[in-house]
Image (spheres, rainbow, N blue to C red):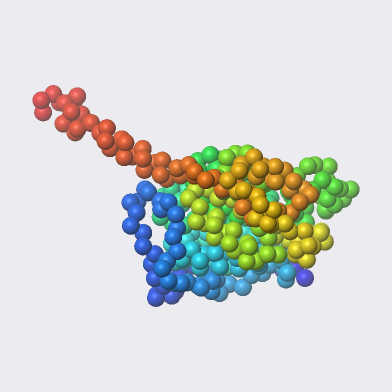
Amino acid sequence: MTNLAAPIIPITPIIPTTPSLPSAPTGQPLMTPPATLEPLPVAAFQAGNFKSDLKPIWCPGCGDFGVVTAITRALAAVGRPPHEIAFISGIGCSSRIPGYTTAYGFNTVHGRSLPIAQGIKLANPELLVLVAGGDGDGFSIGGGHVAHVIRRNIDLTYIVMDNQIYGLTKGQLSPTSPRGRKTVTSTFGSLEDPVNPLLYVLGYGASFVAQGSPADMPGLGRIIEQAIRFPGFAFVNVQSPCVTYGEAEQQLKAQKARIVSLESIGHDPADWASAAERAREQATKFYTGIFYRNPNPPPTYGQAVSQRQQSLQNQAVPRHDILNCFVPNH
Ligand code: SF4
């Protein structure tokens, strides 16, 4: 049923081959990232423009199929051409995802997608930067990096496909596996409480925190689109079921029966305390939608660098004054 014996295919940059694709207007100084990504005036792109010819080798029925579809729909709605997008991932089943899009992709090493994505964004602030990976990649080996991308407020979108298992390596306990979960490495049931990704990023001050599921494809596409448009670090936790090693209650059919849209219960995404309270219920409730969106987003790291450069320019000492220090009356 699974293709896990297949070798990992290194993802190489895929340069869009559609010469007629329009370029989005930029008009921004090099170090000033756009505050928001406005849609182009016409529907310039379809989701198909962002799907590569590479066929996914995920197990049939894997939730990640839905996630890549939602991402391509969101990218079409945002309207940036594929060559203006960098899509970075770590290691794991879900980290194959950049290769299935026409964006530039970099399948990095385990847990190191965020440092590399930050470097890419700082080197070329005009790129739209997406990062994707699994719960193990993001909250175990890479967990230390999450706090730092949040406190810097790097303007990128981080999508975690949370299936509470290590799927690529055949079903070990992951950092989000619930207490009691039986796996090949916890045959009598896990003795550990899981990491709560929503509380984790809220606690470190993320300004955009959301959760979605391929069980609600239109909703997931809208959430990812809003995350991409958010001016600053945005986090989307996707409950993406592993059909091969996951439990029955994690599968799409069971998810559909449990989903509660935050919008439907009147949740105010501007209310951080309410967002944290909802996030604390992660073990027993399945909320989808935007938990928190800072109504007054702080400056991004790129904007802060730009402001610093500007202020230093204004304080610049005239060149002849500097030379006078070494060669008086030169
Ligand atoms: Fe297969 Fe699970 Fe990996 Fe998806 S996450 S490809 S279902 S092992």
Viewer-side residue, 225 vs 189: 225
Residue 248 visible, this angle: yes
User: Residue 101 is drawn in which quadrant?
Assistant: bottom right
Q: Number of numbered discs present?
A: 0
Q: Is residue 20 left or right of residue 95?
A: left
Q: Position of residue 211 (x, y in %)?
A: 65, 54
Q: Which residue does the image show at 47% across and 61% down from the upper left?
A: 85
Q: Position of residue 238 (x, y in %)?
A: 66, 57
Q: Which residue does the image show at 43% across and 48% down from the upper left?
A: 122
Which residue occupies the extreme front position in the image? 266
Q: Which residue does the image show at 54% across and 57% down from the upper left?
A: 226
Q: Quadrant of the N terminus?
A: bottom right
Viewer-side residue, 302 vs 92: 302
Q: Position of residue 123 (x, y in %)?
A: 41, 50
Q: Against 316, is 276 above or below?
A: below
Q: Which residue does the image show at 63% across and 63% down from the upper left?
A: 219
Q: Against 221, is 36 above or below?
A: above
